[in-house]
Amino acid sequence: PAPKPTMTAQKKPVPINKADEGQTVQQLARQALAQEVRNTYERNFAQNNIKGFKIVLGELTGYRPSRKEEGIAVVPYGVKEIGSGVFAKNKNLHCGVLPPTVEKVGPNAFLDCVNLEKVIFHEGLTHIETAAFQGCHLLEKVIFPKTLMHIGAFAFFDCRRAVFSVGSTVTHIGAAAFNNCGGVTVHAQHPVYVMHAGCLVDKVDHCLISAA
């Protein structure tokens, strides 16, 4: 007689932990959002939608918008550095959007943009140089990316409405970086900086960085 076929045991599906499932969904959502941002910038770049921006070897060196584009500056994807004084004293600028490719905001980049209300950073930014946003009186809450390491002297001096939260990745803050601003908080486990009586203090070198 022919041998009877053997039955192979089917493996039971491994149950997915709800917490793991939720985390995976959050990760996918973040990845999708990041991809959407990249696609938007890439489409704009492909359509040559960079009128008014002068870019040299990845550095934004000039900005002359048309009347229709005044008010908001969406820096093209691919720019790595915002050059010195590019947007300085621009009274028509209300919002600046920097792409994820920007690693550095140069000295005086947005100096005395007195009507600038909002600036959007992305992960990848590491340096904000001297007086980059000094005198931006209407600038409000600023969210620093986790990649930020360096904040230059006077970087946000006299940003009267802005509130800042300094993360543990920031390793350098220059003198008077947050003087006369709306408020500053520092990561509780920060190895160098601490808030004391409303002032930002370097607890390693025992010196005052910024006063309220």
Image (tube, rainbow, N blue to C red):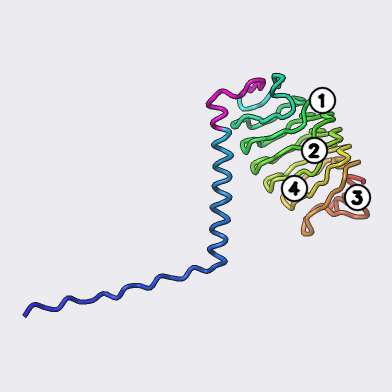
The residue that disc 1 covers is 91
Name the amino acid type tagged 3: Cys
Say how many tags the image has: 4
Disc 1 is placed on an element classified as loop
Determine if the magenta segment contains residue 180: no
The residue that disc 4 covers is 170
12 versus 27 height, above or below: below
Q: Distance between the residues labelled 2 and 1?
A: 23 Å
Q: How far apart are marks 3 and 2 (CA)?
A: 17 Å
Which of the labelled discs sits on residue 199, or is there none?
3
Q: In this view, does 54 lie to the left or right of 166?
A: left
Mark closer to the chain start, 3 or 2: 2
Q: Residue at x 74, y 53 (%)?
A: 168
Q: Which residue is drawn at 93% across and 54% down?
A: 197
Mark closer to the chain start, 1 or 4: 1
**In the image, residue 122 lies at what x, y percent?**
66, 41
Q: Residues within 10 Å of mark 1 (few under 14, many from 20)?
A: some
**In the image, residue 123 lies at what x, y percent?**
65, 44
Q: Report if the CB atoms under discs 1 and 4 are less than 8 Å apart.
A: no
Q: Which residue is drawn at 72% across and 44% down?
A: 149
Q: In which quarter of the image is the N terminus?
A: bottom left
Q: Distance between the residues labelled 1 and 4?
A: 30 Å
Per the rendered image, the range of residues in magenta is 42-56
Name the amino acid type tagged 4: Val
The residue that disc 2 covers is 152
